[in-house]
Amino acid sequence: MHNFQELKIWQKAMDVAEQTYILSAEFPKEEKFGLTSQIRRSAVSIPSNIAEGAGRNTNGEFRNFLGIASGSSNELFTQLILSNRLHLISEDKTQALIKDLIEVQKMNYTLIKKFSK
């Protein structure tokens, strides 16, 4: 069992989720139940699954939740690109958030490999 609040990956994933909420607040009102909702759920899912996995009893269980977080990060990545293509967020803001998201993905991959041994 790990203290999730001390994990750098959880902290960085929380930053990504926070920035996603801030950016998606600028989306048009008609997207409230569409892309805004979906992008926020994906962003929140990343640190949530890291935290849930950290509270499990075995490293294998933790690895499983890291895998779910990985899927959510890919989902968020796709939604950010789509948001940019639909001109809901600028290229600069998209790339800045994607840069942070890629950092989380790399950290996640490293942890998954560590717990796969």
Image (tube, rainbow, N blue to C red):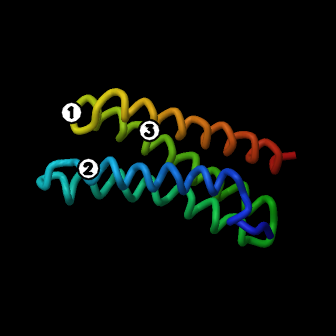
- Sequence-wise, the earlier of marks 2 and 1 is 2
Determine which of the numbered discs, if any, sits on residue 86 in the image: 1
* Residue at image location 36% in from the left, 38% down from the top: 80
Q: What element carries label 3?
A: helix
Q: Which amino acid does label 1 sit on?
A: Leu
Q: Mark 2 points at which residue?
A: 35
Measured as percent of width and height from the top left, residue 63 is found at: 72, 55
The amino acid type found where label 2 is placed reads Leu
Q: Which of marks 2 and 3 is nearer the N terminus?
A: 2
The residue under the point 82% across, 45% down is 114
Instruction: Determine whether the residue tagged by mark 2 lies in a helix, strand or loop.
Output: helix
**Disc 3 residue crowd, few under 14, some 14–19, many 20+, Cα 10 Å:** many
Task: Decide if residue 59 is on the left or right side of residue 108.
Answer: right
Quadrant of the snapshot with the N terminus? bottom right
State how far apart marks 1 and 3 are (Cα): 14 Å
Give the residue pinned by disc 3. 77
Report crowding for label 1: few under 14, some 14 to 19, many 20 or more residues within 10 A (C-alpha).
Answer: few
Q: Which amino acid does label 3 sit on?
A: Phe
- Tell me if residue 115 comes above or below residue 99 in the rendering: below
